[in-house]
Image (tube, rainbow, N blue to C red):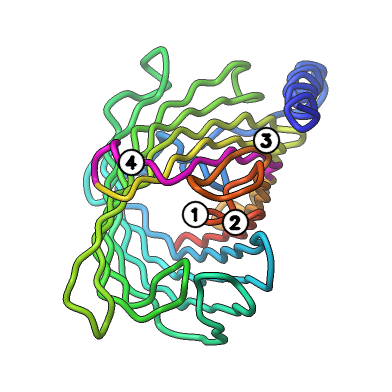
Amino acid sequence: MRMARVGAMSFALLFAFAQSMTTCGASEIETEHLFGFTTGSDVGSLGEREFEGSTTARFGKRAGRYTAGEQTLSAEFVPLPNLRTEYSADVVAHDIASLHGLDNRRQLAIGGFAADFRYRLLDRATAPFGFALGIEPHWSRIDDGSGARVHEYGADLVAAFDKEIVPDRIVAAFNLLYQPEVSRAKTGSDWSREATAGIATALMAQVSPGVFLGIEGRYLRRYESFGFDDFAGHAGFLGPTLFVKLSQRSWVAFAWSAQIAGRAVNAPGQLDLVNFERHQVRFLFGINF
């Protein structure tokens, strides 16, 4: 596949470029916020406090018009060594028209709240690789796909691994993902269950002090239950990532991810545009205080 070849070439170019940086000093790598859609194993320093923002846009279905957005604001604290805590609230927006199975909708609404707890079990500085476990329980009043009003409860579970391939130059990350959710329509009485499982991987190279360029890939599978028996569809995503450390206290990151392969159950086409979108874009920023 052409996009896969482009991804492989990007990995090779990043590796060669970072190895050639012999005259430019590199900053120490911190993977806590380095990636767009992938999670790093770093959790910040003891006592660290940070205000963070994340803007995510998802757009593109098989037909019609579909755009969904989410603006999240978060407060992060590191109360204990190796333990990162974060508390978030979000606002969501939907612009949907002429899509089979979804009501036409144009709205801006308060989405919900979430808490994120991440504990680092292995530190790259003293172990062969970094390893952290994370759980993010959340509650939402708006379905992120359809924009309908719901009562929704879920959790994002992640096992995050990372390793510096070239010290202070190139870092690779790998995630195992599982995201169960239970929801009920605002006016309904029946609860539905679904889950998303998959993997994510990323490679980032420091092209100048505090500036990283890289590529991320994800493979996700959707199920209409908490288990793995009611398969609904799958999708593969690939795209570039940029991270810039603006100062000792601030940073920004940008990532774009395009669906390059997939299939929905009982739906035509080579992509899964029922359970996932064609494009996902994310912008993040953070300020220590």
Earlier residue among tags 3 and 4 = 4
Give the residue type that dot 2 points to: Glu
Give the residue type that dot 4 points to: Tyr
**Disc 1 and disc 2: Cα gap in Å?**
7 Å
Give the residue type that dot 3 points to: Ile
Earlier residue among tags 3 and 2 = 3
**For residue 239, what is the image quadrant?**
top right
Q: Which residue is mark 2?
A: 277
Q: Kindly report which numbered mark, 3 or 2, lies closer to the viewer in this rendering.
A: 2
* Numbered tag placed on residue 25 in the rendering: none
Q: Which residue is mark 1?
A: 275
**For residue 171, what is the image quadrant?**
top right
Badge 4: residue crowd in 10 Å (few <14, some 14–19, many ≥20): some
Q: Nearer the viewer, residue 273 or 145?
A: 273
* Numbered tag placed on residue 215 in the rendering: 3
- Mark 4 falls on what kind of element? strand
